[in-house]
Amino acid sequence: MKGVGDEAEMTAVMVQHLFSHLTAGNDYVIDNRSKNLPKYCPCEMENCKAMIKNGCTALGSLQTWHGNADIILNQNIAVSLIECPSKEKNLCIETDDKFEEENLSDPIQKDKDEEAGPSSPKRICKDDNDNEEKETQSQQMIDQVIAQTITNAFSQVSKTPALSGWLIPTFGCALDHVIALLYDPKNDVLLQCVDKIPIWGFYGLYLPSIVQIWMFLNFTVFTIKDLADDYELKRSNFHVLAKYRLEDYRKIKPGKAFNPTYDCDYYSDVLIRMRKKGKKAHKKLAEH
C-alpha cells in the first residue's frame, strides 16, 4: 500500500485492505465520480483482485454546505482523502557564508570538498512563501473535513433518528496517518483528536491505531450517547451561527446527487463565519 501513487488507486487500496476489514460485512462505497477509479483492487497481491464498490457519496443540499465524500463506511461515516506535503518539493540550500569564504581562500581545501561532496554547513531550508502556501492548503483541507463532519452528522441523524445524541465520526485520511473529527448535532459538540493517528509502525500496520479506528467505526458501541450531559463540553456554536439555516441542515438526507454542474465542494456562509470566529478565539487564547 505504501507504493500506491495515484489518488484513485490509493483510495481503492486503503478501503479494500484497511477500512473494509474494520466494518461489518465490508460495508463501504467509494465516490463514483472519482477519476480513474479501478474496477478491481490494484494492490497486485496474489489472489486479491477484489471488485471495488462505488456509488453516490453526496452530502448536504443546495441550501447548506454540500460536496462528495471520497468514501462512506458503514453507511454513516464519511472519509475524505487529504494530501501530505511533499518533502522533496521547493527545497533550497542555505550556506554558512563565513565557512564558504574560508574554503574559497584555500584552494586545496576547495578541491577536497568538491571530491567529498556537499559541505556539512550547508543546510536544507524551505522558502517562507512555500510554507505559507502549504499552511493555507492544509487549513483548507481541515476546513473541508470540518464541514463534511458537521454535514454528515446532520444527514445521518436525519436518516436514522436513533443516532441523535451520538458523536458521529468523520475521517481525514492520508497514506501515513488519519485524523478524526466527531460531531453531535443534537448537543452541538464538535471534537477533534489532538494527535494524528499513525497508520504505520516499524514492522507494518500500527496495531493500536487500527484498534482506535475500529472503535471509531463502531462508535455506537464504544462511545457514550449524550456525552455533553455528563461532561462540561464546550459547544461549537454552530447552532447559533447557522440559526437561519439550521432547519435546512436538519433536513439533509445522505446519498442525494446534485446538479452535475457542481464539480467542487461549496462552503456555506455559515461555515465560513464559524471558521473566522474559531480563529479569533484561538488568537485570544494564545495571547493569554
Image: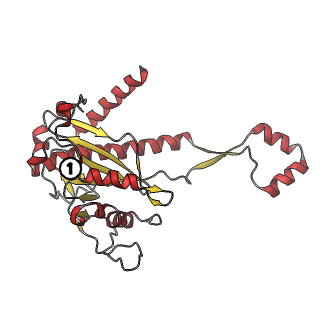
Instruction: Name, please, the residue furthest toward the top.
Output: 288
Quadrant location of residue 114? bottom right
Instruction: Note whether residue 10 is visible.
Output: yes
Query: Taking 17 as reference, is 114 above or below it?
Result: above
Instruction: Please give the count of numbered marks on the rendered protein.
Output: 1
Q: Tell which of 220 and 76 is nearer to you.
A: 220
Q: Quadrant of the C terminus?
A: top left
Residue 231, how many percent across, how many down? 23, 30
Residue 226, how many percent across, how many down? 16, 37
119 sits left or right of 201 in the view: right
Amino acid on which the number 1 mark rests in the picture: Val
Q: Tell which of 207 and 258 is nearer to you.
A: 207
Q: Tag 1, which secondary structure?
A: helix
Residue 144, how many percent across, how many down? 31, 46
29 sits left or right of 124 in the view: left
Quadrant location of residue 102? top right
Query: Taking 31 as reference, is 183 above or below it?
Result: above
User: Which residue is labeled 1 in the image?
Assistant: 221
Residue 160, how many percent across, how many down? 10, 51
Q: Quadrant of the N terminus?
A: bottom left
